Image (tube, rainbow, N blue to C red):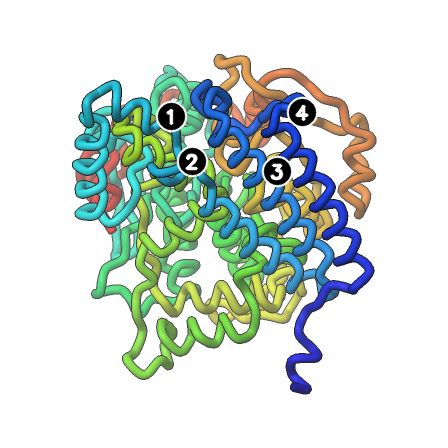
Amino acid sequence: MQQMTHLPQISPATLAELQADYLKQAAALWNSALGQSDVPAVSDRRFSAPEWRANPAASFMTQLYLLNGRTLQQMAAAVEADDKTRARIKFAVQQFVDAASPSNFLATNPEAQKLALDSHGETLARGLQQLWGDVQRGHVSQTDESAFEVGKNVATTAGTVVFENELFQLIEYAPLTPQVHARPFLLVPPCINKFYILDLQPDNSLIRYAVAEGHRVFVVSWRNPDESVKHLTWDDYVEQGVVQAIRVVQAISGQDQINTLGFCVGGTLLACALAVLAARGEQPAASLTLLTTLLDFADNGILDIFVDEASVRLREATLGPDSPKGPQLLHGQELATTFSFLRPNDLVWNYVVGNYLKGEAPPAFDLLYWNGDSTNLPGPMYCWYLRHTYLQNELKVPGRLTVCGEKLDLSAIACPVYIYGSREDHIVPWQAAYRNTQIFKGPRRFVMGASGHIAGVINPPAKGKRSHWIAKSTALPADPEAWLQGATEHPGSWWTDWSAWLASHAGAKKPAPKAPGSRKYKAIEPAPGRYVKVKA
């Protein structure tokens, strides 16, 4: 009983107010159903088909469902608890509300029912076939996966694998200009999912764009871990991964300094590697670009609700180096499912309804194909990352962590830094990306783009889409909102601003290399290589 008194509760006064408001709105809905008042319009796209409004029972059910959902969320927001507990309750309630939508069930979806009747059951037959196919694949299909093949119509920028070890392949891309900048350019993508988010199609490829801008481009293609490498640690990813890639690019190009870019957790790994090298007296980066990257984990967006001491200990006990069964893999499908349920209506229930209830094959979409091409992670590496970043937020504290035998100090990275955040990013909130400006001491530039974690980054200038914000002055106040107040919105992609910045650190032009690699690092196979084609 004593424990029960400490459970999150809603104050009686607030609860009474919510109940009274609910009864008032429910009565209004009932009156509208009896024809005593107009039925309010529904803007929710799940119920936008005319069948929902034409059917009085379905219309009433929809309105009642939306009212119930709003009330449950108001109750969750009114819970008297700490911010994290309240956020977890709100997330759980939203998951329940989204799953309970009448659009998700054939018996309560008039649109799906009409399609079934009009097609004499053909839509249901197709839906069952697609359901069985997804059961065999182990996930809900978000796109026509048969429409894509890595190396054939995604990840097609011409290049060559010039190095590989048990962690990654290094790809050097063929030049598209007669001359290239003297300093090469190394991109470190996230090891969660695969590198070709940066090379989906020729017209939206950041890799191809950088090559066309006259850079000698190298990209890390992380291996999709299997049982043979399930023991690898964060230190291994830094030393055998990013540091090794830097060494090879330096050796092939003959340049002591190179330009570098890290995307998402690839940026976290890259920053760690540069800090390790700084501790060893080396400054190999002429510039550092960080795209939607967390270094200060004080605000982790929606992912924060999944992380606490108990959950991290559970991961360590089941996947970590000291677990009873030894190190294990975190399987890619688990991560993919977690990320999908961060936006369940868009990435789960939308496809349940379309694929199974309506019998509609999902359209071919390169970004969603990439999204479903998940990767595993070694348990020890993942557990270290969870504990020292998301849980304990130690990466930003100089000297707190030891990586590869060196005390980390990110502020010791002595190069200009370009930091990008997406305004609607739910994985790396733009304010969290902005806080990276307070970590480094050298020249820094922060730019915010429109849209989310992926769409904000992959926004080629030729498309003429979205916009970006740049501050009128070079000042970088500690408060992100203060920066935003002094920023100006510009139409179109942020890529052009970044490209001009990168060129200023890339050195003079020289004739493009006639062949990839070098005498020591010879061509192994054409891009995109073997590693990226391995399925989780």
The residue carrying pointer 2 sits among few (fewer than 14), some (14 to 19) or many (20 or more) residues within 10 Å by Cα, namely: many
Q: Is residue 42 above or below residue 191?
A: above
Residue at 49%, 47% (x, y): give it: 342
The tag earlier along the polypeptide, 3 or 2, is: 2
Residue 296 image-quadrant placement: bottom right
Q: CA distance from mark 3 to mark 2?
A: 35 Å
The residue carrying pointer 4 sits among few (fewer than 14), some (14 to 19) or many (20 or more) residues within 10 Å by Cα, namely: few
Q: CA distance from mark 4 to mark 2?
A: 26 Å
Q: Nearer the viewer, mark 4 or mark 1?
A: 4
Q: CA distance from mark 1 to mark 3?
A: 39 Å
Residue 43: where, in percent of width, then height?
A: 58, 25
Query: Mark 4 is on which residue type?
Result: Gln
Dots 2 and 1: beta carbons under 8 Å? yes
The residue carrying pointer 1 sits among few (fewer than 14), some (14 to 19) or many (20 or more) residues within 10 Å by Cα, namely: many
Determine which residue is flagged by label 3: 421
Q: CA distance from mark 2 to mark 1?
A: 9 Å
Q: Nearer the viewer, residue 334 or 6?
A: 6
Dots 4 and 3: beta carbons under 8 Å? no
Residue at 80%, 47% (x, y): give it: 478
Q: Nearer the viewer, mark 3 or mark 2?
A: 2
Of all residues, the one furthest to the bottom in this rendering is 2
Determine which residue is flagged by label 4: 36
Dots 4 and 2: beta carbons under 8 Å? no
Determine which residue is flagged by label 2: 103
Determine which residue is flagged by label 1: 111
The residue carrying pointer 3 sits among few (fewer than 14), some (14 to 19) or many (20 or more) residues within 10 Å by Cα, namely: many
Query: Mark 1 is on which residue type?
Result: Glu
Residue 452 image-quadrant placement: top right
Q: Is residue 272 left or right of residue 392?
A: left
Query: Mark 3 is on which residue type?
Result: Gly
The tag earlier along the polypeptide, 4 or 3, is: 4
